[in-house]
Image (cartoon, rainbow, N blue to C red):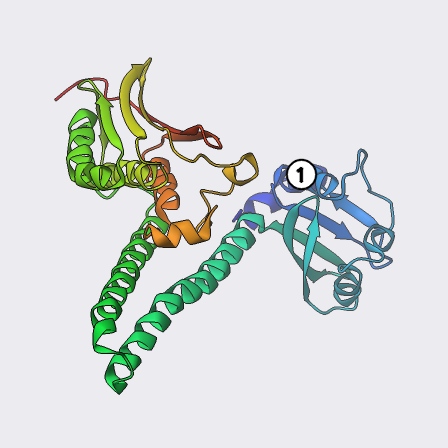
């Protein structure tokens, strides 16, 4: 918020004071329009021209003509009649909150860009709806199997199978809740909670050891090509990041396939690359696989215990480490996920 100290402006000559106010308004990122009682534009700034896609100034033109037929027409009239009004306005892919206030006998119109806020609110709404659906699915299965067991409807030979299904759905529910909690924590994190020099080669070795048994279960060979390369970061989050990438590469592979974890230096950056020989991702899905709960193959994802949140978590962890992430894939050829992180200039 810009505060203009009135006593300083009053000491300036009238023309200089007017020029100062106009300079301040024109330098604002928010769109500002000042109109007189007849609705004629007296003052505006470049932000307004950008909002309406205009190439020349609109001073001296009718504000009513500028907003005619839009959601702004009524609020502008309200302000000219001495009443404050608000409106939501969308144009050029941007969303604005528009505040229309009486200003003397005229009106002042202020455009606040709320695009990012609107996107965040939409994501939160979608996330809440998806969470409700994803939690309901395994709970419904657990309840159904439990009711059949409790009522005695299940045959003795089916009890073990029902118990196994209940356990599988409970494990999926537990994984889902864990991922939701982690995403919620990452959403609230703008900076890393604690940083330290981290040897990524040790992270790679730890993740490979943890997932070796799972790789063997899926018939996938796990390889690593690493060197002692250091970054400044949070070791727990970096472990979670790599675990999710490699876990996906194993689950969406094929028997006899392989996963390779490579670590190398590229200038001032450390590059972590995970390549697999799996089923791959069709081009039309590649931009969306980082979205929360997005699954290319829903049936396969649920069979393998996927929550649809793994890559979203990876994206958040990379972001809080000021890194970049790239995903390249070809159907039936495999997928490569590349993460670049700022390197540690000096080893501890």
Above or below, 185 relative to 242: below
Residue 29 in sight in this render: yes
* Identity of the residue furthest to the top in this view: 267
- For the point 23% across and 37% down, the residue is 215
Res 222 quadrant in image: top left
Outermost residue, bottom side: 151
- Quadrant of the image occupied by residue 241: top left
- Furthest residue in direction left, as rendered: 348
Horizontal side of residue 167 vs 333, given as left or right: left
Judge whether residue 293 can be spotted in this image. no
Taking 232 as reference, is 10 above or below it?
below
Q: Secondary structure at mark 1?
A: helix
- Please state which of residues 66 and 119 is positioned toward the viewer in this rendering: 119
Residue 87 placement (x, y as % from top left)? 68, 62
Left or right of residue 172: residue 27: right
Q: Position of residue 76 (x, y in %)?
A: 77, 61
Q: Position of residue 127 (x, y in %)?
A: 45, 58
Horizontal arrangement in the rendering, residue 153 relative to residue 112 (left or right): left
Number of labels in the image equals: 1
Residue placed most toward the observer, 120 or 237: 237
Q: Nearer the viewer, residue 303 or 294?
A: 303
- The answer to which of 106 and 219 lies nearer the viewer is 219
- At which x and y percent is residue 29? 60, 41
Horizontal arrangement in the rendering, residue 185 relative to residue 84 (left or right): left
The residue under label 1 is 26
Q: Residue at x 24, y 84 (%)?
A: 150
């Amino acid at each position: 918020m810009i505060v203009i100290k009135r006593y300083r402006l009053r000491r300036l000559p009238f023309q200089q004071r007017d020029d100062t106010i106009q300079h301040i308004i024109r330098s604002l990122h928010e769109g500002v329009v000042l109109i007189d009682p007849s609705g004629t534009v007296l003052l505006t700034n470049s932000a307004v021209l950008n909002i309406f896609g205009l190439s020349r100034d609109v001073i001296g033109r009718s504000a009513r003509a500028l907003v005619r037929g839009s959601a702004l027409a009524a609020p502008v009239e309200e302000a000219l009649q001495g009443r404050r009004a608000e409106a939501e306005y969308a144009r050029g892919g941007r969303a604005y909150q528009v505040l229309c206030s009486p200003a003397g006998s005229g009106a002042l119109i202020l455009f606040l860009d709320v695009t990012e806020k609107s996107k965040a609110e939409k994501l939160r709404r979608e996330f809440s709806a998806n969470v409700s659906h994803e939690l309901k699915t395994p709970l419904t299965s657990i309840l159904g199997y439990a009711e059949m067991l409790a009522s005695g409807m299940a045959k003795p030979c089916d009890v073990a199978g029902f118990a196994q299904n209940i356990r599988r759905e409970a494990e999926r529910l537990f994984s889902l809740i864990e991922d939701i909690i982690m995403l919620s924590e990452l959403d609230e994190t703008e900076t890393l909670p604690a940083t330290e020099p981290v040897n990524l080669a040790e992270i790679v070795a730890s993740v490979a050891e943890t997932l070796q048994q799972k790789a063997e279960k899926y018939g996938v060979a796990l390889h690593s090509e690493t060197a002692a390369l250091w970054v400044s970061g949070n070791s727990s989050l970096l472990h979670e990041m790599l675990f999710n990438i490699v876990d996906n590469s194993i689950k969406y592979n094929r028997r006899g396939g392989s996963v390779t974890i490579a670590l190398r230096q590229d200038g001032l950056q450390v590059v972590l690359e995970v390549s697999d020989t799996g089923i791959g991702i069709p081009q039309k899905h590649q931009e969306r696989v980082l979205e929360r709960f997005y699954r290319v193959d829903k049936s396969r994802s649920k069979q393998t215990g996927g929550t649809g949140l793994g890559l979203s978590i990876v994206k958040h962890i990379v972001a809080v480490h000021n890194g970049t992430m790239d995903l390249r894939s070809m159907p039936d050829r495999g997928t490569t996920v590349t993460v670049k992180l700022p390197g540690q200039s000096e080893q501890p």
